[in-house]
């Protein structure tokens, strides 16, 4: 019986994750954040500066803050027995380097992971190339992480 309950909980978690992913993807598409030109327009501070991303963030941050406030009042999430929160508060070389690479890729391509997956789903070849490069970077990180131990 325990195995069946765990399987049904995992299936429900997967379904909820899929639905939340679709909702997030829909929001990104409606806001125009799947268009790298919009993101690059925000990151380029000249006469053609595009504040769209700023408005998206100004709408998203209060919603997230409110939901986070409500969630943290719970002893555990709705579909799990405990919170999975990173424990490390250390800023190290790997974190800084990873952040720099993320920002560099975002600034050069106009994509970050959420919008690029949405764009791949919409059939963008440019997004597919970015995802391939992202996967290579993720694999390299794993390789260097294990090599340094």
Image (cartoon, rainbow, N blue to C red):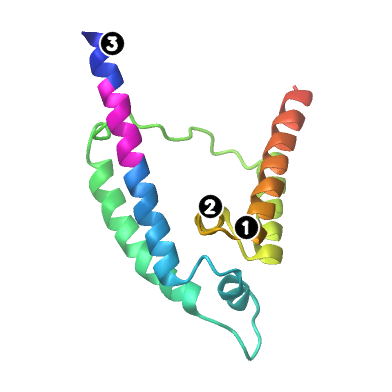
CA gap, disc 3 to disc 2? Answer: 33 Å
Q: What is the quadrant of residue 38 in the picture?
A: bottom right
Classify mark 3: residues with Cα within 10 Å, few (<14), some (14-19) or many (20+).
few
Query: Can the viewer see residue 81?
Result: no
Tell me whether the residue at label 1 lies in contact with that at label 3, contact meaning CB atoms closer than 8 angstroms.
Answer: no
Mark 1 / mark 3, whichever is N-terminal: 3
**Residue furthest toward the top?**
1
What range of the chain is rendered magenta? 8-17
Q: Is residue 42 left or right of residue 138?
A: left
Task: Count neighbours of disc 1 (C-alpha within 10 A) and say few if under 14, some if 14 to 19, many if 20 or more.
Answer: many
Residues at circles 2 and 1 in contact by the CB criterion of under 8 Å: yes
Could you tell me which residue is drawn at 63 percent across and 91 percent down?
Answer: 47
- The secondary structure type at the circle numbered 2 is helix
Q: Residue 127 carries which label?
A: 1
What distance separates the C-alpha of mark 2 from that of mark 1? 7 Å
Residue at far front of view: 123
SS at mark 3 in the image: helix
- Relative side of 72 to 114, left or right: left
Label 1 residue SS: helix
Residue 107 visible in the picture: yes
Residue 3 image label? 3
């Amino acid at each position: 019986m325990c195995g069946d309950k765990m399987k049904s909980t995992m299936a429900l978690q997967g379904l909820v994750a899929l639905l939340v992913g679709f909702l997030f993807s829909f929001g990104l598409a409606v806001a125009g954040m799947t268009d790298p030109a919009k993101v690059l327009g925000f990151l380029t501070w000249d006469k053609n500066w595009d504040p769209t991303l700023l408005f998206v963030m100004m709408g998203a941050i209060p919603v997230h803050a409110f939901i986070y406030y409500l969630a943290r009042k719970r002893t555990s999430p709705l579909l799990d027995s405990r919170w999975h929160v990173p424990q490390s508060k250390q800023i190290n070389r790997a974190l800084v380097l990873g952040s720099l690479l993320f920002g560099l890729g975002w600034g050069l391509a106009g994509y970050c992971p959420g919008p690029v997956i949405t764009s791949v789903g919409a059939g963008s070849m440019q997004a597919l190339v970015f995802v391939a490069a992202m996967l290579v970077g993720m694999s390299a990180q794993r390789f260097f992480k294990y090599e340094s131990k």
